[in-house]
Image (cartoon, rainbow, N blue to C red):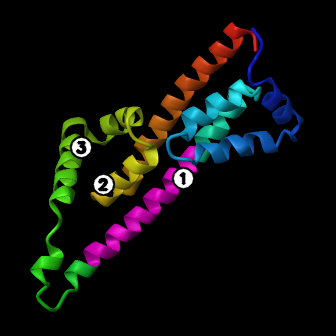
Amino acid sequence: MDNPYEGIREWVQQLPELVQPLGVGIAGMVPYIEGEGAAGIGIILGINPVVAALAAMIGNFLSVLAVVTISSRVREKVVAGRGNEREAPDPAAAAPSARRVKGQRRLQGWLSRFGVPGASLLAPLALPTQLTAAFFAASGVRKERVLLWQAIAIVLWTGVIAALATGLVGFLGW
């Protein structure tokens, strides 16, 4: 069976060796593609599996770092702003929507049940790491803790998918 991606693979192989992992890293920054998808795509397109996996991990982590940094700063400003209110706030404006309350309860339950480590390791099965990291940072989890466990999850899941993609490419003879 021929490789259905042969044309794209040939094009990728013609790119300078520095550009190939940069493309994988940029793909790793995209939610739902992330490190896992980017590494798999890179490997299928003929990039060295170790290079593809490392580039995908770095790209995914850099996007999570940006999200956590921004989310933490926003949370700090919101919390500081609440402490500086001099007038009585408008109760209608301050009341969160029922949907928001339900989401907050679900997230708190998730964090309570699995903790940051468990939630970080399981979340990629359903949600992008960027979204999970933003939830954690916005809920008040220290950004260093969020980054540590998101990095572990990125390395773990990207490594697993890279190994599977490498085996698949080898098995199919691509």
Give the CA separation, mark 3 to mark 2.
Answer: 10 Å
Measured along the vertical axis of the image, is residue 61 above or below residue 50? below
Q: Main secondary structure of the magenta part?
A: helix
- The label on residue 153 is none
Measured along the vertical axis of the image, is residue 97 above or below residue 174? below
Q: Crowding near pointer 3: few (<14 within 10 Å), some, many (20+)?
A: some
Which label sits in the foreground, 3 or 2?
A: 3
On screen, residue 119 versus residue 62, left or right, reads left
Q: Residue furthest bottom?
A: 87
Point out the stretch of residues depicted in magenta. 60-80
Which label sits in the foreground, 2 or 1?
A: 1
* Residue positioned 23% across, 47% down in the render: 107
Q: Residue 71 placed where, x, y %?
A: 40, 63
Q: Name the residue under label 3.
A: 111
Give the CA separation, mark 1 to mark 3.
Answer: 22 Å
Q: Mark 1 points at which residue?
A: 63
* Residue positioned 42% across, 36% down in the render: 124
Q: Residue 11 placed where, x, y %?
A: 85, 34
Q: Residue 82 placed where, x, y %?
A: 22, 79
Q: Name the residue under label 2.
A: 141
Amino acid on which disc 1 is placed? Ser
- Determine whether label 2 and label 1 are within 8 Å by CB: no
Q: In which quarter of the image is residue 23?
A: top right
Q: Crowding near pointer 2: few (<14 within 10 Å), some, many (20+)?
A: some
Upstream in sequence: badge 1 or badge 3: 1
Instruction: Name the residue nearer the viewer: 145 or 140.
Output: 140
Upstream in sequence: badge 3 or badge 2: 3
Amino acid on which disc 3 is placed? Leu
Amino acid on which disc 2 is placed? Val
On screen, residue 160 versus residue 53, left or right, reads left
